């Protein structure tokens, strides 16, 4: 048996190392290490509940809105307040901008440049991939950044600034949209749709959202070869990416984009082709292999974050969240499965969650969310309130705020004592996906996905494809 340590990884958010054990030429075991402790859960102790709105967005500079949304949901429960329909729709618009920008940044800037490496130059598709997706220089980069800038103008108009907006509140949003501003927002959204339809997909968004089978996906790939998404599908077929990075096929998601018409994606647990309601009471955190106090599973509302950097059993600052004792994968693929999307259900039924199905889920979700944003914007009733006033003091002593960040389920568990925060526990998407082993030595989802990978590649490109297919955010992981 041999051992190799990979890291620090480039083109991921935060710090990441991976230790791989090899036997018979393949990865026999993996240990994923988040080496940087950040301690936001401890920063929040003893503070007024509303202080969380200023502190938790600073956990991350990429998904700060998601942290704000989870905090606002938890505070809404604590204060016993329900945002008006306008407030929910504007919150959804702000959140959707961040999630879509994340999906595009991941695809164009983090994930695809790996295929432009010289290691793949013997493949017929490499020249086109290099020209289009080379890091910083590819022809696809500048148009994507211009389109992303349009999204950021949309974000700035509604949220004031990004990241770390204070626009999102327990009772709704501080932003009031005027008729003239709605027209401007609609124009920006149309410009962004045009980029997606001309460059990313090469077809109308509705056509991409309507892809309902592997056969339809293959027909799209052959029919639209110039599109960036189709180019990925072509090289994915050549490299057999559907055979790479399968984990447990246990998926977890929270409700996404709640509103007056209900959530766009239901909360739940998906396994063995069957979805069930989210068993919130069965979610636990296990610190056995973390550099934190504690050993076995503990409910988040009853867990403290106490650093133990010299803990002999530890190898990561990440906790190990589990649901009903199982490690669960979260992300766009989980959301799509719980929505019952036939294409994703067929992909997972045939080869499980893998590099291909995760990227397909992420990009087809973009095609679904933009029309939804157009609907939310048109549905605003401008003469109605956007925010309800918050009571002077909390009405409850504990709450759970759940949402869906781009990378998956994000939860804030809050407990108050005498009106101040006594516990604030956060389980981020990459905490689920990149968790270490637990007290039963059950590997986390990425650790499981890396088992069996061929070790012959000296650059470990297969490992990097698997890692980036989860779109990790390590700063959120070690909040």
Image (cartoon, rainbow, N blue to C red):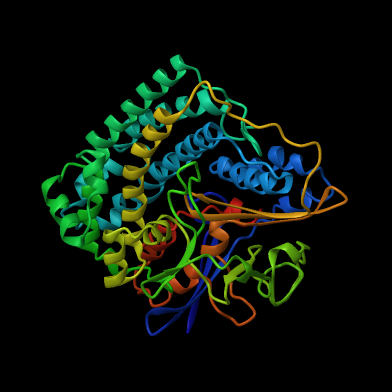
Question: Is any part of residue 252 visible from this angle?
Answer: no
Give how far across and how far down residue 40 sits, in percent.
72, 50
Camera-side residue of 140 and 126:
140
Apparent side of residue 244 relative to residue 181 in the rendered image (left or right): left
Question: Is any part of residue 468 visible from this angle?
Answer: yes
Camera-side residue of 215 and 39:
215
Give how far across and how far down residue 253 sits, in percent.
49, 59
Give how far across and how far down residue 416 sits, in percent.
80, 53
Instruction: Tell me which residue sits at (36%, 47%) in the image.
Output: 107
Instruction: Tell me which residue sits at (25%, 43%) in the image.
Output: 228
Q: Is residue 183 above or below residue 365?
A: above
Apparent side of residue 342 relative to residue 458 in the rendered image (left or right): left
Give how far across and how far down residue 420 sits, in percent.
84, 48
Q: Residue furthest top?
A: 180
Instruction: Tell me which residue sits at (33%, 48%) in the image.
Output: 363
Apparent side of residue 302 relative to residue 449 in the rendered image (left or right): right
Q: Is residue 308 above or below residue 111?
A: below
Instruction: Tell me which residue sits at (49%, 35%) in the image.
Output: 89
Camera-side residue of 442 and 341:
341
Q: Residue furthest right?
A: 418
Camera-side residue of 15 and 332:
332
């Amino acid at each position: 048996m041999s051992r190799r340590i990979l890291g620090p990884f480039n083109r991921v958010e935060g710090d990441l190392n991976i230790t791989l054990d090899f036997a018979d030429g393949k990865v026999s075991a993996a240990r994923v290490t988040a080496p940087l402790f950040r301690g936001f859960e401890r920063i929040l102790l003893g503070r007024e509940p509303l202080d969380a709105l200023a502190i938790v967005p600073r956990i991350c500079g990429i998904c700060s809105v998601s942290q704000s949304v989870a905090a606002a949901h938890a505070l809404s429960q604590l204060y016993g307040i329900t945002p008006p329909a306008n407030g929910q729709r504007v919150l959804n618009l702000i959140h959707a901008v961040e999630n879509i920008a994340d999906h595009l940044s991941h695809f164009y800037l983090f994930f695809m440049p790996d295929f432009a490496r010289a290691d793949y130059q013997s493949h017929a598709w490499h020249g086109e991939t290099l020209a289009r997706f080379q890091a910083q220089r590819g022809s696809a980069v500048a148009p994507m950044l211009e389109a992303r800038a349009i999204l950021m103008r949309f974000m700035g108009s509604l949220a004031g600034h990004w990241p770390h907006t204070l626009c999102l509140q327990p009772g709704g949003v501080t932003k009031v949209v005027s008729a003239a501003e709605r027209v401007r927002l609609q124009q920006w959204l149309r410009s962004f749709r045009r980029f997606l339809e001309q460059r990313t997909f090469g077809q109308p968004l509705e056509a991409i959202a309507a892809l309902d089978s592997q056969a339809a996906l293959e027909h799209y790939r052959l029919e639209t070869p110039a599109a960036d998404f189709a180019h990925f599908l072509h090289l994915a077929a050549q490299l057999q990416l559907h055979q790479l990075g399968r984990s447990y096929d246990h998926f977890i998601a929270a409700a996404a984009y709640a509103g007056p018409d209900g959530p766009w994606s239901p909360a739940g647990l998906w396994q063995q082709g069957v979805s069930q309601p989210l068993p919130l009471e069965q979610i636990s955190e296990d610190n056995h292999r973390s550099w934190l106090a504690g050993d076995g599973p503990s409910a988040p509302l009853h867990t403290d974050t106490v650093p133990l950097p010299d803990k002999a059993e530890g190898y990561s600052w990440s906790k190990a969240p589990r649901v009903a004792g199982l490690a669960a994968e979260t992300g766009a693929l989980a959301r799509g499965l719980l929505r019952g999307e036939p294409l994703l259900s067929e992909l997972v039924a045939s080869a499980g969650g893998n590099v291909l199905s995760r990227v397909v889920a992420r990009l087809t979700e973009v095609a679904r969310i933009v029309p939804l944003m157009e609907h939310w914007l048109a549905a605003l009733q401008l003469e109605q309130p956007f925010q309800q006033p918050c009571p002077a003091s909390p009405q409850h002593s504990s709450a759970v705020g759940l949402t869906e960040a781009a990378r998956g389920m994000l939860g804030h568990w809050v407990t108050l004592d005498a009106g101040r925060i006594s516990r604030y526990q956060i389980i981020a998407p990459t905490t689920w996906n990149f968790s270490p082993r637990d007290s039963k030595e059950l590997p986390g989802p990425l650790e499981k996905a890396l088992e069996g990978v061929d070790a012959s590649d000296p650059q470990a490109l297969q490992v990097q494809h698997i890692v980036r297919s989860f779109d990790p955010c390590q700063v959120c992981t070690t909040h």
